[in-house]
Image: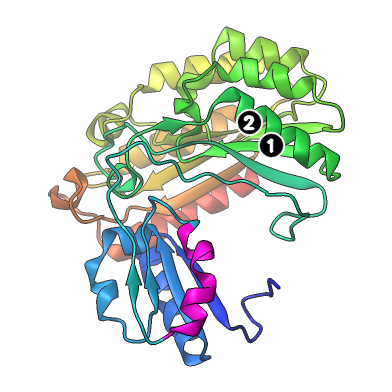
Amino acid sequence: MVVDFSEKSDLYIINTCAVTAESGRKSAQIIRRALNRGGCVAVIGCYSQLDPTINEIQGVSYIGGNRDKAAVFRKADELLENSRTRYEESFDLSGPGYESLCIGTQRTDVFSTCRAYVKIEDGCNGRCSYCIIPKVRGPVRSRPVAEIISEVQRLAIKGYKEIILTGIETSAYDYAPLSELINIVDGIEGIERLRFGSLSPNTITDGFLTAAADSRKFMPHIHLSLQSASDRILKLMRRPYNKEQMIKKMEMINTRMPDMLISADFIVGFPTETESDFLQTIDFVNAYGLSHVHAFPFSPRPGTAAASMSGKIPARELKKRNEILIEHSRNV
């Protein structure tokens, strides 16, 4: 039986994150919290994929990365019988292995009563200068359309009404255009609402917006991964677009779907970011009335190009700019 993490358990499975230094710190904290409660502790995900020092945490019975997270469930009985033995899975992400999110045959409490996430791809082929994701998640592997349809249909039968198509880099899905997935879900009986996870602005095309506007189920909300509104910073970040292209995409959305709510991710305090660079992001949020902003202070990740860049912004200034952006977005 699956229980809440706050309850006593025989086996704690901790799916870790390492996208920022803070998420890595919290992952280590949760691992130690589970160890203090007793029971068997299994650690999987990005933090264990990235940081070899996880092997130094005494008491962890199972360590796996991102290649096959489901392996821990197949070994659950063995882990419980031999909790003093440490098991380690392959961390190789170079093969065709795909970490799927499949709901199985029984209703699950992982999702809410009406909303379910369907993973359509894993990995990322991008080379953004600040991002550790390609290293810990591997290259893009997309899920076949037929498999996505099958899972959405099973979810509909189980009573789920809302589907969120998501992935590590949802926009990189390459078995079919995302517009085709909109049309497909539109035709699945029982599903009433459709959303996507975070999208690149490059995803916003005439075809995508036509499918979204014509859909009976597409919810009027798009979340975009923008990161900055300064051309200079976007170039240093190696983002695959510039400010002019961002503006064009925003205007396309506002013209085709004027009731669309747009939220976005931004990184604050990237190395060498000036006050002028920062104010360009503030002005962009204001100009397009973003409904919500996820603001993150720059966090250097080991092995990335940005980690060795000069011109780091002092921690106090990072915090200040992050708070200003968040507060400003709330008042737009």
Q: Is residue 108 left or right of residue 26?
A: right
Q: Is residue 186 depicted above or below 104 in this figure?
A: above
Q: Quadrant of the C terminus?
A: top right
Q: Give residue 273's position: percent from left, percent from top.
A: 27, 43
Where does the magenta region start and end? 71-83
Helix, strand or loop for disc 1: helix
Q: Is residue 204 magenta?
A: no
Mark drawn on residue 148: 2
Q: Give residue 309's position: percent from left, percent from top.
A: 14, 47
The chief SS type of the magenta part is: helix
Front residue of 131 and 30: 30
> Which residue: 58% across, 28% down?
288
Are the residues tagged 2 and 1 within 8 Å (C-beta)? yes
Q: Residues within 10 Å of mark 2 (few under 14, many from 20)?
A: some
Q: State the residue position of label 1.
A: 151
Front residue of 145 and 330: 145
Q: Quadrant of the N terminus?
A: bottom right
Q: Is residue 62 depicted above or below 102 in this figure?
A: below
> Which residue: 32% across, 86% down?
58
